[in-house]
Amino acid sequence: MYKRNIYIDRIRPFFGKPVIKVIIGMRRVGKSCLMRQLIDEVRETGISPDRIVYIDKEKYEFDAVRTYHDLMRYVSAHAPENGTRRCVFVDEVQEIESWEKAVVSLSSDPKTDIVIAGSNSRLLSSELATRISGRYVEFPVFSLSFAEFLLFRGSKAGAPRDEFMVYTRYGGMPGLHHLEFTDETIYQYLNSLHNTILLKDVIERHALRNSLQLEALVRFLYNGVGTIVSAKRISEYCKNQGTSIGIETVQNYIAALLPSFVLHRVRRFDVRGKRHLETLEKYYLGDIGLRHGILGFREGSRAGVLENIVFHELQIRGFSVSIGKIGDREIDFIVERNGKRSYIQVAYLLHPQETAEREFRVLKQINDNYPKYVISMDEAWGSDVEGIIRLNLVDFLLDATVPG
């Protein structure tokens, strides 16, 4: 089994510390597998197996653990508090009623390490955040990066450039690697997974009544990935398609989609005004394969798909991501991490010449010394342009040091 070291390395320093470790991410991105790998980690440090409790609410054997009372009883029965270190892992913790009360109680024991995982970004409700303020750390987990995708492919992997085309087509959900790599098989799986996410994490959780409206909105956002949108524009589109959705309803549906991680909102940042703007954002998918599972793979939508893949990679690398505005021009990504900023333009190919000039022109207008990149699928390169670094997209995905 491939170890997802990028996440293990981030979580490891917090074991043995009085903080609750919270793993969040979309369904089926590998949170359960990561938890099992973390259990192996703590065993290797000398923790006895009888001091490790693991509860997976997606398994029938844990069906009886339904409330915080049940959770406390289960932990006490399997690893009672006795002054020695114990580790408690709870997967899909949101399925346990009032689970936060048990977590707060368990966290009061300095000898108890707690790791919880869930498929909803609102896992840490305002109530819980207030009660354990300063005592938890969130670790978002995503579907496979392209580098991980190659490792999962193993001996089946071809040349990286060829495998990238497969990754572009199917995305990075870990479960794909148990299936035959054909459009029919993969897209059936992705469509089923997407339907599960919408049903369990959006429709049921938020008590939405009109699934047809939600489906129309989702198709619009997926089809226009990488384009700036507004609630008004979505409402007008749906009306033209025969599905009437008011602007407020559009906003409510998007607010319901975002916590499931199937969709991510990226705000605009005004470079000259040095502030985030409140309107006209972009939306990217939690995994590009889900788009193709719903809409089918479309050759003519390369630009938005490549943007989504770059955005996904930047998330995995821990960057804060915005889209940029300078005058009337758009910067694909402004990324920040550890106080450092970079600017990124993404293009399919930098020809004809007008395309190259357009991508570089906007970066030349930025009057600061932060690194600037243009990333594309081009293989033949000239020199960098006025300090703007040119990168091949596949090389970028396989070089975790970029941007610096």
Image (cartoon, helix red, strand yellow):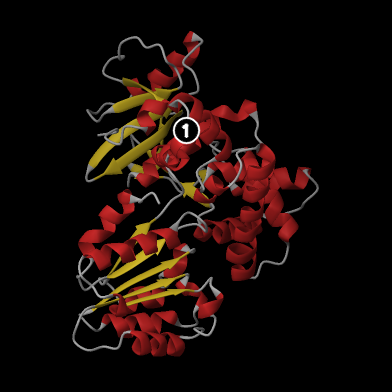
Residue 257 in picture, x, y percent from top left = 57, 57
Quadrant location of residue 300?
A: top right
User: Does residue 201 appear to the left or right of 185 in the view shown?
Assistant: left
- Farthest residue, direction right: 242
Above or below residue 184? Residue 62 is below
Residue 79 in picture, x, y percent from top left = 31, 84
Residue 233 visible, this orientation: no
Please give the name of the residue rendered at 23% of the width and 73% of the height, measured from the top-left corner.
Answer: 47
User: Does residue 392 appear to the left or right of 254 in the view shown?
Assistant: left
Residue 316 visible, this orientation: yes
Q: Which element type, helix, strand or loop, lies under badge 1?
A: loop
Above or below residue 115? Residue 7 is above
Residue placed most toward the observer, 347 or 360: 347
Residue 152 in picture, x, y percent from top left = 44, 43
User: Does residue 329 appear to the left or right of 112 in the view shown?
Assistant: right
- Inspect the image, locate mark 1, and give the three-letter code of the amino acid beneath it: Ala
In this figure, which residue is indicated by the disc labeled 1? Answer: 157
Q: Residues within 10 Å of mark 1 (few under 14, many from 20)?
A: few
- Farthest residue, direction front: 155
Residue placed most toward the observer, 45 or 290: 45
Please give the name of the residue rendered at 36% of the width and 51% of the height, measured from the top-left corner.
Answer: 4
Residue 137 in picture, x, y percent from top left = 29, 64
In this rendering, the count of numbered labels is 1
Please give the name of the residue rendered at 44% of the width and 23% of the height, measured from the top-left corner.
Answer: 376
User: Does residue 180 appear to the left or right of 103 in the view shown?
Assistant: right
Q: Quadrant of the C terminus?
A: top left
Quadrant location of residue 395?
A: top left
Please give the name of the residue rendered at 45% of the width and 35% of the height, measured from the top-left corner.
Answer: 155
Residue placed most toward the observer, 2 or 327: 2
